[in-house]
Amino acid sequence: RNRAARLSRLPQAPTRQVQSFEELPEYQRVNVQRAAGEMIGVANPFYRSHDRAAGATTVVAGHELINFASYDYLATNTDPRTLEAAKATVDRYGISASASRLVAGERPVHTELEMELASVYGVDAAVTFVSGYLTNVASISCLMGPQDLVIHDEFIHNSALAGIKQSGATRRLFRHNDVENLESVLRTLSTEFRRIMVIVEGVYSMDGDIANLPALLELRNRYGFWLMVDEAHALGVLGATGRGTFEHYGIDPKEVDIWMGTLSKTTSSCGGYIAGSQALIDILKAEAGGFVYSVGLAPVLAAAARCSLQILRSEPERTEKLHRNGALFLECARAAGLDTGLSLGFSVVPVIVGDSLRAVQLSNELLEQGINVLPIIHPAVPEGMARLRFFITCDHTEEQIRRSVAVTAERLKDLQERNFGLASLDM
Ligand code: PMP
């Protein structure tokens, strides 16, 4: 009773109302977008649910569609060999690694996949993480800290930005693919930094252009920084045998300090990797929180990715076909007067249409015409640069490409001619 009396004499903490999520400005933004879409009768193109594996074609709500929204670049997602490898691994190991690799999550297939990845890049070693996104976050924040500097292309992926933010390093950016601008940033550094890292993408995910690797390496050797290249959209895509940006330029891959990639695109699985020197990989395996404190990559995903990599290496004709498809798409799109921006064909071809509303409407109209392609709108790209992003795969047929480009050009022209008198929808 004494204790209760003592407590009742203590000053009371002010009552603080629990904030409801509905009150948040973030939620209000979501609702404004939803209401605006409903008001003008534009269906939400996102979260379309697919009834089967999505490759060059797919099925949405029972309708067979030509599909340009999935990045199964070499069409290994449904290859009988990948499925067989996955099934055999499930039979043996179940689904999950059930623990971090360090404790009880290690399976032989992890090492097999990592050796395969290291061999693709001709480097000492590789390590895998449970997602591509996590790979960037965990590795950048492990290697860099508050005394360091990260300079990146202005168009790098959100996951790399998240890694830089988490690292606490100073962040500077350079104009997209502008090596002279990067050099001017390097030349004018006023502070002494402990470490400097420059981050670029092999093939840029929104634009489909390619990093100027030879010029970047020349700068690396003069200014002394680590070069990290995100190969998410380049593995299986660039180079005669699909080994990526270094093969495209005929460069020794050992010259790049950190190769990063994802297992979700060309290797049609899930996860990500870093490939490089043995010391780099040893550091990440011991110190990267997103590796040490996270479950090991599911063995089934590792086995599927490994099988896809083996297909990539033994069947370069898939990459060749992808090159032909990308070139054909680009040629047809340009001939039809479409704005493909900086794209060089290969895996990613944007069709830039202007404001976000138009991109959403065009995507919806193409769906009605049997073509699935998704809009990329603000804030993923600057307003006015909204686009449809076409992912090209080796499985698309010439007919599918020609028809899709023709229908896109026709629907876009029609949309431009209709006067909506509506302000752009900032989705
Ligand atoms: N880097 C780039 C360039 C990407 O485009 C993506 C995702 N599309 C990632 C990293 C993250 O990979 P994941 O989706 O496999 O997590």
Image (tube, rainbow, N blue to C red):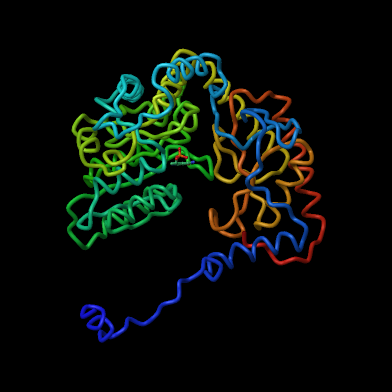
Q: Position of residue 72 (x, y in %)?
A: 55, 29
Quadrant in which residue 291 is drawn? top left
* Residue depicted at 20% across the width and 37% down the height: 286
In the displayed structure, 249 sits above or below 316; it is: below
Quadrant where the image shows the C terminus: bottom right
Residue closest to the eye, 53 or 21: 21
Q: Is residue 254 left or right of residue 71?
A: left
Quarter of the rendering containing residue 388: top right
Q: Say which of 288 and 353 sits in front.
A: 288
* Image coords of residue 231 (percent x, y): 41, 35
Side of 191 where 21 appears, left or right: right
User: Number of callouts in the render?
Assistant: 0
- Residue 39: name its quadrant: bottom right
- In-image side of 332 versus 96 (left or right): right
Q: Position of residue 186 (x, y in %)?
A: 27, 54
- Quick check: 227 above or below 317? below
Where 323 sits versus 363, above or below? above
Give the quadrant of the N terminus.
Answer: bottom left
Front one among 89 and 54? 89
Residue for point 41% across, 49% down: 178
Residue name at image x 79 percent, y 62 percent: 420
Image x and y of residue 321, in percent:
58, 21
Q: Residue furthest front?
A: 1
